[in-house]
Image (cartoon, rainbow, N blue to C red):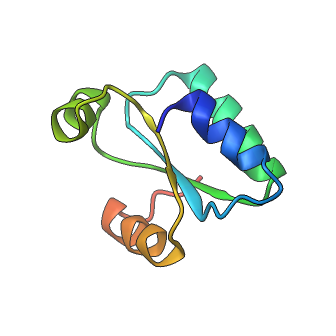
Amino acid sequence: MGFDAVTQELASPRTKAAGVVLAADVSPKTEKEVRFAAEKHGREVVRAEFVMDEAEAAMGKRVGVFLILDAGLFGSLKKNIGRQTR
């Protein structure tokens, strides 16, 4: 969770990252940088409908960038997010 952790993991040659989920209210700069890092390493990014405050209520930490390691879970999330890939 979080920009630094996600971009660091994406750059790892041993990453098992399936994809990245962004909260609806991440800043344009954060989104641009995450998308750049993900594309550089062949990972997909989807934008969710939840906002960071909702993530905080569910997870106890206010973040807007989530790295998903499980390909099946990432596929399911993409379907439920409404296929808003970019």
Q: Is residue 2 above or below residue 45?
A: above
Q: Residue at x 83, y 49 (%)?
A: 40
Q: Is residue 35 visible?
A: no
| Picture mark count | 0
Q: State the image coordinates of residue 51 (x, y, percent, origin top left).
A: 29, 33
Q: State the image coordinates of residue 47 (x, y, percent, origin top left).
A: 45, 47
Q: Is residue 22 left or right of 19 when viewed as pictured? A: left
Residue 24 found in image quarter: top left
Q: State the image coordinates of residue 35 (x, y, percent, origin top left).
A: 68, 42
Residue 42 found in image quarter: bottom right
Farthest residue, direction left = 57
Q: Is residue 9 visible?
A: yes
Q: Residue at x 79, y 45 (%)?
A: 11
Q: Residue at x 46, y 57 (%)?
A: 84
Farthest residue, direction bottom = 72
Q: Residue at x 27, y 41 (%)?
A: 50
Q: Is residue 47 above or below residue 84?
A: above
Q: Is residue 7 left or right of 31 when viewed as pictured? A: right
